[in-house]
Image (cartoon, rainbow, N blue to C red):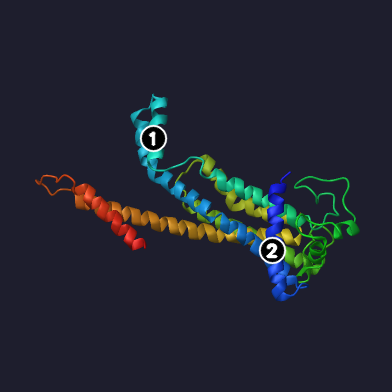
Amino acid sequence: MLDFVYYPVSAVLWLWHTAFASILGPGSDLAWVLAVICLVACFRAALVPTVLKQVRNQAALRRLRPKIAAIERAHPEDRARRTEEIRRLHADNGVGLFVGCLPMLVQGLLFLGLFHVLRSFDRTGVGSHIPFQATSTPMSPEQNATTPNYLLGADDVRSFLDTHLFGAPLTATLAGTPGVTVTAVAITLMTVAAIATHLAARVAVARQDADTAQARVMNTLSLWVFPAGALIGGAVLPIAVLLYWASTNAWTAAQQYLVHRRVDAENARREADTVVVRAATTPKPGARPVRGRSRRIRYQAASTGRAKRL
């Protein structure tokens, strides 16, 4: 169903494992662990430009709220005119209402792809073939060990099945019959994933200025319910998927902090340039404004801002 996602994901995983295996040895457990982590980093890094665009779009929407409120007050009864003026305001400031949809869609597809490929190394269970569905014909261990996992060959499958993380097999789950090692590794990864999810939510919530019932419900879900889901849902996930989950959530937390910090710095420079332009173009009391001065000052301020950024 999503082969156009599964095959590229398996190809990137194969490339990373091949690279690390050539350095650490083909039988190295660390080669597969690093391959999974780098697989996450590779795809998440490719999404940084879209995430940055999304955060900039959200910042622009916040800056336009006073103007939008003024339009709504000016035309309380004329909905069509309000909509048209707000649409024009968004267009003039480069704001897109659906900018945030693309990163969410791509991240959702990648999550399914990563989740499915990692889980498909062990297809001996009833729920191991298709995401979130069951099969009545699971493979036997012998069939599974000789069946490729998309672009990962049978040798890669057997190598993955023999890989351990601190003594815990990558295909083991906490819901089965785990030993002390599997329990310790699984709980550690689940805890890391939950904490990272909470930290990412705190960064996002700290930049919200809307205090509505809907916002409070979403904040509660993102701050507490979603991290709790990482703890509860992690019990049925293989160690490999938990490793992916902890890695991607830790990436999200760091990315939220760094991206928002960069956008905040851009907004601060923009505000400083605006203050310079206003101060330079405001005529002194009793003085006549000079035509063309505003445009020259604005150009000089913009040029100075670009020079500082360079």
| Amino acid type, mark 1 | Arg
User: Distance from label 2 to label 1 (Cα)?
Assistant: 47 Å
Quadrant of the drawing holding the N terminus:
top right
Quadrant of res 302: bottom left
| Nearest to N terminus: mark 2 or mark 1 | 2
Up-down: is 92 above or below 265? above
Quadrant of res 214: top right
Up-down: is 26 above or below 8? below
Residue 46 shows in this picture: yes
Give the residue at x 42% y 34%: 87
- Crowding near pointer 1: few (<14 within 10 Å), some, many (20+)? few
Can you name the residue that lies furthest to the top here? 77
Mark number for residue 15?
2
Give the residue at x 43% y 44%: 61
Give the residue at x 86% y 59%: 146
| Amino acid type, mark 2 | Leu
Foreground of the two, 266 or 305: 305
Quadrant of the drawing holding the C terminus:
bottom left
Q: Using residue 13 as the reference point, say whether residue 306 is left or right of it.
A: left
Q: Position of residue 74 (x, y in %)?
A: 33, 30
Mark number for residue 88?
1
Q: Position of residue 8 (x, y in %)?
A: 68, 54
Q: Secondary structure at mark 1?
A: helix
Foreground of the two, 166 or 303: 303
Can you name the residue that lies furthest to the bottom here? 24
Q: Position of residue 10 (x, y in %)?
A: 72, 57
Q: Secondary structure at mark 2?
A: helix
Residue 232 shows in this picture: no
